[in-house]
Each structure stands twice: as structure tokens, then as C-alpha cells.
Image (cartoon, grey):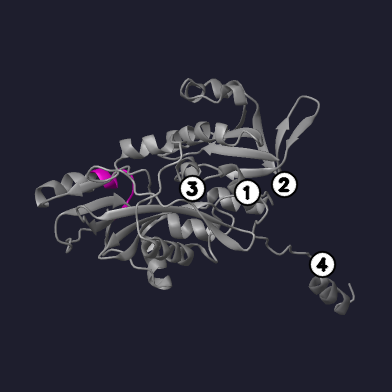
């Protein structure tokens, strides 16, 4: 089966996307793989699979490779006398802006291209942490207390210290700080506002139990990954998450009760169903006093969370068999014809 990996993008997580694409190349070796790189100027390049290494991009070598345009149901490589079509399912592996904010989803929907990844509405509720909070409230999912700050206004923080400060629309722990008292607040706010004009403030719960669970919908049901308890220091900082993006070895299952595992899966279903069909997502949960709280939704997890699945290739095949379908619009012009006929024109 042909599968195209799309990665890069104009995002603070651009380099993370490159690491993810390189990592899953070997995990999907039984597919007929091709690779399309989107640079920061939104130019698409067809990348030679043999050149899928970090220095190809850091040294700008990709600029010597064929450029592509996008058209109905395909990417197109234009030559001097002819053009080459690149068709097939696309795996959206652009992290952050472009990939997770709904831009690529809208582009693919517009051009009728099959793709693995969150659709526009799912992107809206998972890319922006403010809207994830709203989703929790709408679906009766527990979440920790929070406050929203905006760079254009001054507002006192009412949550007791220690707190965690993070940009509303960014992943990989970029711009995230733990603030233990008021003397550290200004620096944390400056760091977060460097990346976004909106930030989320939450209580920092020291020693909280955290679990990751990925899954996807196929063949009429949700398929779950292994439940992982991530190893962390004070919190999962950028360096730790960066290493996670290059993981390919399957993780050990978290040592938890069957009751807690069931609660995690039930909460995941609430998040996923009727919103994330067509995507493989990972949810990060807190467990406080045996209650499950949604921390974040990762609509395009690092390296597609391949390390959480027994058979990652089969997971991708299954999603491709179960894409959500939208109704085709057939334009008939009956209304205009009836008006023209009534007027005798």
C-alpha cells in the first residue's frame, strides 16, 4: 500500500516533525513509502527516502529535490514536458502549527486527499489548550483548574503556588515553566508569551500520577495502545519529550489495576468519539485520588506513538480502511435554471 509521510511545516515544532518522520520510516517499512517535506515557506518537496536524515534539512540539501504542487486528489511534480502524479493516502506528521491547527486538514479536505490525522474540528479542540478545556466541560470530562492570561491585558492569578505556565497553542513542553512563588512569575510569563499571546495557568501538582494512552477508530470500534506511565523528573520538559519523539522500542505496560485501566479507556472514548475519527491520537491523563483527569490531547503524537502499539503497521492499515467519509456535493444548477426559465431567458 502506498503511504506518503508529510512532515516539516512552519511551526516551532518543525524540527520535532523531522525527527518523527525519520523515526517511523523503519516502523512502516512494509508500506510503499514516499516522503513530502513542507518547508517554512509552505513549499512542498519530494524527498529521496535514502536522504531521510537530519542533515538533509539542516544543511538545506532538500532544496535540490523536486518541488510539488497540490491539486485534486494528488500532489503533482511538474517537468519540462510532462508531469508526474503522486497519489495515495497521506500521513499528516506535521506537529504544531500547520499540522495540528487544522490548516493541512482543511487543505486536504478541499482537494479530496485521503489522510491520517485530525480533521478540522478535531484540530480546533486539541491544538488550543483553552478549547480542550471547553471540550472537557462539554463532554463531562474531569480536568484540573485553570486560568487564561492574555498578553494584551493584566490579570491577577488566583491559583495558589506552585503553578505551571504554558502557551495555549504549543506542544513539546516549549515555553512551559513551573513557578514556585511570585518572584519567578514574570520570567515564566515572558517565556510563554514569547511563543503565544495566550497562556494557560494550572496548579502544579507535585508527584501526580500520569499515564499516556493512544488509540484510533477502525472496524467499528476504538483500538487502544498499551497504557504507559512516562518517566519524568519534575515534569516532562522539552529535552525529555524530544527524546520521546525518536522512540521506536515498545514501552512496558504501566503497572495499574484493571479498574484504573478501564477508567482511562472510558475517558479516552469520551474524548475521541464523534470528533477524532480518521486520526491516531494520544491522550495524557492525570490520576488524582483514583479519579481520571484529562491533561492534554496530542492529535499528532510524536512518532505517532508507535512505541505504544504491538503492531504499529497494522494500526496504520486499519485506519486507512476506516476513514470517515463526507457526502459528495453534486451541483445541478436547478435553482438557477428554474429562475431563468420563469423569466423566459
Circle 2 residues within 10 Å: few <14, some 14–19, many ≥20? some
Q: Earlier in the sequence, mark 3 or mark 1?
A: 1
Circle 3 residues within 10 Å: few <14, some 14–19, many ≥20? many
Which mark's residue is nearer the viewer, 1 or 2? 1
Circle 1 residues within 10 Å: few <14, some 14–19, many ≥20? many
Check residue 147 in the rendering and tell me which mark sits there, or answer none: none
> Does dot 1 land on a helix, a strand or a loop?
strand
Give the camera-side residue of 191 and 154.
191
Check residue 115 in the rendering and tell me which mark sits there, or answer none: 1
Q: Is residue 90 left or right of residue 293?
A: right
> Does dot 2 land on a helix, a strand or a loop?
loop
Q: Which residue is tagged 3? A: 300
Q: Earlier in the sequence, mark 1 or mark 2?
A: 2
- Which segment did they paint magenta? 191-199
The picture places residue 338, in percent across and down from the top left corner, at 84, 76
Check residue 73 in the rendering and tell me which mark sits there, or answer none: 2
Q: CA distance from mark 3 to mark 1?
A: 12 Å
> Does dot 3 land on a helix, a strand or a loop?
loop
Q: Are marks 1 and 2 in contact (CB under 8 Å)?
A: no
Q: Earlier in the sequence, mark 4 or mark 1?
A: 1
Which mark's residue is nearer the viewer, 3 or 4? 3
Q: Earlier in the sequence, mark 2 or mark 3?
A: 2
Residue 168 in sight from this viewpoint: no
Name of the residue lying farthest toward the bottom: 342
Give the camera-side residue of 61 and 24.
24
Check residue 332 in the rendering and tell me which mark sits there, or answer none: 4
Q: Earlier in the sequence, mark 2 or mark 4?
A: 2
Amino acid at each position: 500500500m502506498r503511504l506518503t509521510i508529510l512532515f516539516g511545516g512552519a511551526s516551532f515544532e518543525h524540527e520535532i516533525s523531522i525527527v518523527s518522520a525519520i523515526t517511523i520510516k523503519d516502523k512502516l517499512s512494509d508500506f510503499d513509502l514516499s516522503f513530502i517535506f513542507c518547508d517554512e515557506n509552505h513549499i512542498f518537496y519530494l524527498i529521496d527516502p535514502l536522504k531521510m536524515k537530519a542533515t538533509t534539512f539542516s544543511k538545506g540539501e532538500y532544496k535540490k529535490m523536486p518541488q510539488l504542487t497540490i491539486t485534486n486528489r494528488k500532489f503533482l511534480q511538474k517537468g519540462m514536458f510532462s508531469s508526474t502524479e503522486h497519489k495515495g493516502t497521506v500521513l499528516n506528521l506535521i506537529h504544531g502549527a500547520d499540522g495540528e491547527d487544522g490548516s493541512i486538514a482543511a487543505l486536504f479536505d478541499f482537494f479530496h486527499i485521503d489522510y491520517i490525522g485530525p480533521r478540522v474540528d478535531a484540530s480546533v479542540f486539541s491544538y488550543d489548550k483553552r478549547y480542550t478545556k471547553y471540550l472537557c466541560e462539554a463532554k463531562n470530562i474531569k480536568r484540573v483548574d485553570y486560568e487564561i492570561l492574555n498578553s494584551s491585558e493584566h490579570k491577577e492569578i488566583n491559583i495558589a503556588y506552585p503553578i505551571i505556565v504554558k502557551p495555549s497553542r504549543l506542544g513539546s513542553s516549549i515555553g512551559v515553566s513551573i513557578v514556585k512563588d511570585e518572584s519567578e512569575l514574570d520570567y515564566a510569563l515572558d517565556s510563554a508569551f514569547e511563543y503565544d499571546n495566550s497562556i494557560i495557568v494550572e496548579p502544579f501538582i507535585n508527584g501526580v500520577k500520569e499515564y499516556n494512552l493512544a488509540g484510533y477508530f477502525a472496524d467499528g470500534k476504538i483500538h487502544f495502545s498499551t497504557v504507559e506511565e512516562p518517566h519524568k523528573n519534575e515534569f516532562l520538559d522539552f529535552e525529555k519529550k524530544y527524546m520521546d519523539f525518536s522512540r521506536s522500542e515498545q514501552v512496558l505496560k504501566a503497572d495499574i489495576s484493571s479498574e484504573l485501566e478501564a477508567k482511562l479507556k472510558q475517558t479516552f472514548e469520551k474524548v475521541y468519539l464523534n470528533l477524532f475519527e480518521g486520526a491516531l491520537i494520544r491522550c495524557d491523563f492525570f490520576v488524582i485520588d483514583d479519579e481520571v483527569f484529562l491533561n492534554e490531547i496530542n492529535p499528532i503524537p510524536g512518532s505517532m506513538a508507535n512505541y505504544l502499539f504491538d503492531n504499529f503497521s497494522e494500526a496504520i492499515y486499519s485506519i486507512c480502511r476506516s476513514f470517515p467519509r463526507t457526502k459528495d456535493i453534486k451541483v445541478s444548477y436547478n435553482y438557477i435554471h428554474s429562475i431563468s426559465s420563469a423569466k423566459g431567458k
